[in-house]
Amino acid sequence: MLERELKFSLPPQLGPASQEEARRLLEELARLCLNVLEAAGPADCRSEDYDALYLDSPDEELGRRFISLRLRREGRRIRLCLKGPSEPDALGSGLGVSLRPEAEKHLDSWLDPAEPRDLERLREELGSFDFAPFTPELPQLLARLPLAARGRARFTRHEARFSSGSGSAFALSLDLGELSGSRASENIAIVELEVSREAPEPEVTDRELEALGQSLKRFGLIPSRFEKARALARLRRIPLLILGAGPAGVAAALAAREAGLAGRDIVLVERNRRIGRKLLATGNGRCNFSNLDICPDAYASLVETEEAKARRDRLTAVWPFARIKEKLDDMGFSCHLEEGRVYPASRRAETLVSWLEELLAAAAVDLRCQLRVLGVEALPQGGFMVRVSEGEALLCDRLIIAGGGRAVPGLGADGSASEWARALGESVTELYPGLVPLTTADRDLQQLGGLRLDAALSADGIRERGELLFTDYGLSGIVAMELASALAPLPAAGLEIRLDFCPDLDQEAVRDLLWRRRARLPQTPASRLSAGLVDLRLGRILWQRLVAARPELGGREAAGGPPAVAVPAGRKGRRRRPSAAAEPCDSALRVGELDFRTVTDFAGLLKACPVTVNGTLSDAEAQLTIGGVRLDRLAETGFASIRNPGLFFCGEVLDVHGRCGGYNLHFAFCSGLEAGMAAAVEA
């Protein structure tokens, strides 16, 4: 038997003890139903107590709530009821109506799944059901479903049965009781309206139910949870499903809608409570989402091939910032430009995220947050099945994977999108943290924690320039993080890089400058030769390195240098922090004593100071992920899978990484637009 269900939440003051109030409410609702349906005669009202045991699977991967299994004891009668998944009803989404196959049978005795013999008998009883109204794979699922009690309840059901003039049978019920289970006990009060689908003209039932539902809403009853249950129905085939509501996923949804897909045909799934959670943290909350200088040189791939480069170059040519700016202007979004970087006019990421939320709502895209994807499978007959944390399996014709990488796991990233792609047979590289600080084994440089300066870093023919930040673990700042991305993956044995502290001067110019200082400041300690050119602490450490490499210089240094300068006591007996000039670490040698070779070697350290890098910080400190789905194994446009028709990728899950400065968010948005348009064209 197939029945329509329409459930409503009730006022919280109704509890298990409110039986008399519940009966009066049911009678009033029944009179309303009779009037709306123009039914003749009174409703047949009755009340009964029953116990219920709800069974479920504790393993989400097997599809929790794919079916609903209930043991119900009504006096001496015991019924085993099996309900299949909700199927979308043509009645419309406003009322929260669902259609569910249902079957039941009577049992001789109560079965407790905690008892092995009862559990075996329960499986036998399930095997005897007629599965014709259900999905074909239900018997196989039941055979491996680890049944366990999800909840127990004691209810009183007040029920009114009546028929309409068209012959449709209605059962209006009000259940009051207490449900206990894995969570704390809770009082339950539910109005449920069931309509038989055996009427001669189903469209008459549709009109009746719609009118009745609207009347019940005016009565103050609001559909509860069934809109979500209907939307997650496993038997519904979603035209386009997008996994991940970051910038790439949102752009894909909006592009598919603009290309002609109806909003209800686009389902956007997000594991967080809200879209764009990582977007909110971008640029310290200011959200640098693009750059004026979008060019091929700003991007690279871990697996660099001619095909991969061609696909990246095509995207940057098709989607320069000027084209994005046109779209933003058309939609009334204002930008702020700052040294080539593009921000929202408000300089707040919240502005951009809120605007994207408004666009999704206006497009009527079916957005489902707080839904965790557990796995993705390709179906033999075409399309895909996505298992989600609600225990349902979403079926779709086309799938866009926009789940991101592993960077910043605290905001929900875990690299699972790459695992979904790998499970579908796609070519996926190893993943590494990108735009991430470097760790070093050079303890002397770690003493410079907090020092910032303009510098150039180079290794393996790669040179990056920008702000460098010394830390107690190594090197940070934009220049270090960009070098980390360019060198990924770092060799296990470590790598020597070179630091240029005078990037605007060549080595000869630095040497000549130091040599002129030798003549001008002959009595200055040698360790201060670079004072005014670089930070004094850095200059001293470089001098110590030179002395360590030149034993003859070490022999000329006085042991320990000049005596420490006494520091006067401050107020309350505290000792003042000595100034850099008073620190007892200056050289005993004077600048005037240095020969041309020593000055040249010191200039060499200023221009190419060797540092041993032994790794990077973790994904938690990275801004993006290096690696992902290989571009050269995807179609030239839309990042469509060649192996799985109907599958597309966009955003950080792809093997593309850009420089710091809005390039990566630009790629995420543009690749999402490409994937969304391509998926809509295939509809």
Image (cartoon, helix red, strand yellow):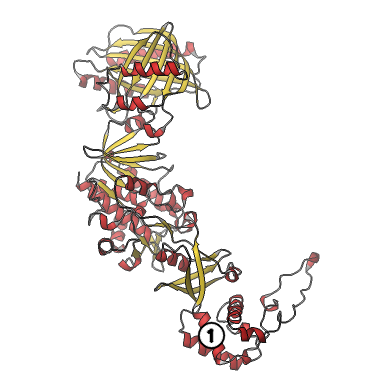
With respect to residue 292, does 205 lie above or below? Answer: above
Quadrant of the image occupied by residue 474: bottom right
> Hey, what amino acid is under mark 1?
Asp
With respect to residue 11, does 615 lie above or below? Answer: below
Residue positioned 51% across, 88% down in the render:
511
- Within-10-Å neighbours for mark 1: few <14, some 14–19, many 20+: some
For the image shown, how many numbered marks are present on the structure? 1
Q: Is residue 295 left or right of residue 272?
A: left
Seen as rendered, the residue at the extreme bottom is 519
Residue nearest the viewer, comparing 35 with 561: 561
Q: Position of residue 325 (x, y in %)?
A: 31, 60
With respect to residue 105, does 98 lie above or below? Answer: below
Q: Position of residue 571 (x, y in %)?
A: 79, 67
- Image quadrant occupied by the N terminus: top left
Q: Helix, strand, or loop for circle 1?
A: helix
Residue 216 visible, this angle: yes
Residue 660 visible, this angle: no
Instruction: Tell me the residue that label 1 is attached to.
Output: 601
Quadrant of the image occupied by residue 242: top left
Residue nearest the viewer, comparing 226 with 426: 426
Q: Position of residue 89 (x, y in %)?
A: 27, 27
Q: Is residue 396 left or right of residue 658?
A: left
- Image quadrant occupied by the C terminus: top left
Residue positioned 19% across, 18% down in the render:
201
Q: Is residue 668 left or right of residue 201?
A: right
Q: Position of residue 34 (x, y in %)?
A: 31, 13
Residue nearest the viewer, comparing 260 with 464: 464
Seen as rendered, the residue at the extreme right is 573
Quadrant of the image occupied by residue 582: bottom right
